[in-house]
């Protein structure tokens, strides 16, 4: 493609809108079709709104310790969910406006409407007033994202049985809440609503909450949720639901039951690949409903690319944005790929979690599969927040750093952090993994004092049992 090609993008979430801006920066003519709001799920109903609310309860947690810190409050602090939600809406609106401004700056055409692929080069758009327009382009990029699940056993009605999108709009704190699914979203909402005073129950079919995270992270998260009064039920699921006038009664596998005011369905998301004309355009859909792509983000149909959640890779906003840049850079003659083994992620629970790379369990399984002894090929270093001067000074002593390394090569395989600012702290480890730095190199790098980042340095040191501010490791221990 020449730099002046016309690229049409379907969907303006963090995948689509970032792809549009990068394509315009590289000189392409860009048209974006979006049926709802610029920014997609992330900005309007996901990452940003949930974090806007969570930031308030984080502050509330801190204020609870004010007496201990020597900050004397006159009167008591109380949450006003309606005002929290109004502020959250303002934050979202200003960010959405920011994207519209960027589109204008870069000369990106934004068409509001529902788009369907008519053929390999055309998107047919139905505008809100019912009128139709065809967009013909040299290349198409599908960035339609994912949707809240529609499961017959959990009939979402927006009143008693809700999606996270609906939960984020509530202006009254429910007395009780059952969260079905103890994954990232479930645990974030459990943190939020338990802090607001709701009696929260989380039910997770796997044997632990956050089942995709490192086991140590899951077990500390479960402990922290329980400390907040959350009832955590693992290894079970909802067998039946009964909707009464003002409560929902959920019965579990072991015949126990709970009656709650609201139920949040937090069990996975579906790919937005159906009903958008992929068949007409000859684009293959995978077994899970995802759109398979190669490392340049191109689908099986030359000239049609797909990015973001709909590709079924990592369902994270920053992955969608990176995929968007990779797609248009490849379209416009550059060569760029993504390293899916070095993707950082933040989980905005109380406390926060940051992770990159393999869990300890994955690292051990991997070495076992390659015929090595997992006990000898994987080294683990740990360090507690409580051992850090900065954590003691700020009172953020809950949490730990964990480094998983390969014996012999000293290669960093994964890093997991639970504690204050974990989602920010994870990026030093991500950079180290990205450039192939060893455990010794990160441990040997001077870290400013007093900072929480020193915890990563100490955990790296601990891989060899030489963390300075930790109890001496016994031989063989
Ligand atoms: P989306 O954001 O889903 O955007 C797709 C866009 O396409 C939508 O705007 C949609 O209206 C539009 N569209 C779809 N079909 C059509 C059509 N036919 N015509 C026109 N327009 C169409 N990720 C993180 O990285 N960090 C977080 O903290 C985080 N928190 C989250 C919290 C919640 C509660 C949820 C639900 C998700 C969270 N995520 C988080 C995930 C993140 O929101 C997604 O990974 C991200 O939004 C995916 O971006 P996308 O561009 O692929 O798709």
Image: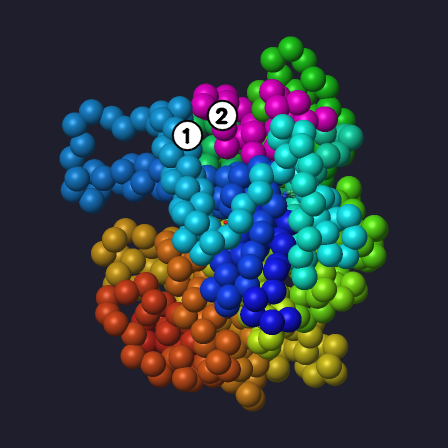
Q: Position of residue 306 (x, y in %)?
A: 68, 58
Residue at (27, 38) in percent of width and height: 63
Q: Quadrant of residue 290?
A: bottom right
Q: Position of residue 227 (x, y in %)?
A: 45, 40
Q: Secondary structure at mark 2?
A: loop
Q: Is mark 2 within 8 Å of ligand 1?
A: no
Q: Are marks 2 and 1 in contact (CB under 8 Å)?
A: yes
C-alpha distance separating marks 2 and 1 = 8 Å
Q: Quadrant of the N terminus?
A: bottom right
Q: Which residue is mark 1?
A: 85
In depth, the one of 23 and 257 nearer the eye is 23
Q: Is mark 1 within 8 Å of ligand 1?
A: no
Which region shows up in magenta?
A: 155-179
Q: Is residue 322 visible?
A: no
Q: Position of residue 181 (x, y in %)?
A: 64, 41
Choose the circle earlier in sequence order: 2 or 1.
Answer: 1
- Secondary structure character of the magenta stretch overall: loop
**Against 395, is 194 above or below?**
above
Residue at (41, 70) in percent of width and height: 428
In depth, the one of 257 and 274 nearer the eye is 274
Residue at (44, 49) in percent of width and height: 104
**Against 55, is 426 above or below?**
below
Q: Which residue is mark 2?
A: 170
Residue 211 covered by magenta stretch: no
**Against 115, is 459 above or below?**
below
- Count all numbered tags in the image, as a single digit: 2
Residue at (83, 51) in percent of width and height: 279
Q: Quadrant of residue 235?
A: top right
Query: In the displayed structure, does residue 301 sit left or right of residue 74?
Result: right
What is the number of the mark on residue 389? none
Q: Residues within 10 Å of mark 2 (few under 14, many from 20)?
A: few
């Amino acid at each position: 493609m020449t730099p002046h090609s016309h690229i049409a993008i379907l969907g303006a979430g963090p995948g689509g809108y970032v792809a549009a801006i990068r394509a315009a920066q590289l000189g392409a003519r860009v048209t974006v079709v979006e049926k709802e709001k610029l920014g997609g799920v992330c900005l309007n109903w996901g990452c940003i709104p949930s974090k806007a609310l969570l930031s308030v309860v984080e502050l509330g947690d801190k204020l609870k310790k004010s007496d201990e810190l020597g900050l004397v409050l006159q009167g008591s602090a109380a949450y006003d969910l309606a005002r929290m939600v109004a502020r959250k809406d303002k934050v979202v609106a200003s960010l959405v406006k920011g994207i519209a401004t960027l589109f204008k700056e870069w000369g990106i055409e934004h068409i509001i409407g529902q788009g369907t692929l008519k053929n390999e080069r055309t998107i047919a758009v139905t505008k809100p007033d019912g009128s139709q327009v065809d967009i013909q382009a040299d290349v198409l990029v599908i960035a339609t994202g994912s949707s809240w699940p529609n499961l017959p056993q959990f009939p979402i009605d927006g009143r008693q049985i809700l999606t996270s999108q609906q939960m984020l709009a509530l202006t009254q704190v429910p007395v009780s809440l059952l969260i079905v699914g103890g994954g990232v979203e479930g645990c974030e909402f459990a943190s939020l609503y338990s802090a607001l005073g709701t009696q929260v129950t989380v039910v997770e079919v796997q044997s632990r909450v956050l089942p995709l995270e490192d086991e140590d992270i899951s077990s500390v998260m479960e402990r922290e949720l329980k400390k907040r009064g959350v009832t955590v039920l693992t290894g079970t699921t909802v067998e039946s639901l009964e909707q009464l006038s003002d409560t929902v009664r959920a019965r579990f596998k072991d015949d126990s039951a709970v009656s709650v005011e609201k139920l949040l369905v937090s069990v996975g998301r579906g790919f937005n690949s159906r009903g958008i004309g992929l068949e007409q355009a000859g684009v293959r859909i995978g077994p899970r409903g995802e759109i398979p792509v190669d490392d340049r983000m191109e689908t099986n149909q030359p000239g049609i690319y797909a990015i973001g959640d709909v590709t079924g890779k990592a369902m994270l906003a920053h992955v969608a944005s990176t995929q968007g840049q990779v797609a248009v850079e490849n379209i416009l003659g550059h060569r760029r790929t993504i390293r899916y083994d070095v993707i950082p992620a933040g989980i905005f629970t109380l406390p926060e979690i940051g992770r990159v790379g393999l869990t300890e369990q994955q690292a051990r399984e991997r070495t076992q599969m390659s015929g090595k002894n997992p006990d000898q090929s994987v080294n683990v270093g740990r360090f507690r927040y409580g051992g850090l001067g900065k954590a003691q000074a700020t009172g953020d002593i809950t949490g730990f750093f964990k480094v998983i390394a390969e014996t012999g090569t000293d290669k960093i395989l994964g890093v997991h952090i639970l504690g204050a600012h974990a989602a920010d702290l994870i990026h030093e480890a991500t950079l180290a993994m990205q450039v192939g730095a060893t455990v010794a190199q990160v441990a040997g790098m001077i870290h400013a004092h007093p900072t929480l980042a020193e915890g990563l340095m100490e955990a790296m040191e601990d891989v060899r049992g030489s963390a300075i501010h930790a109890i001496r490791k016994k031989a063989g221990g």
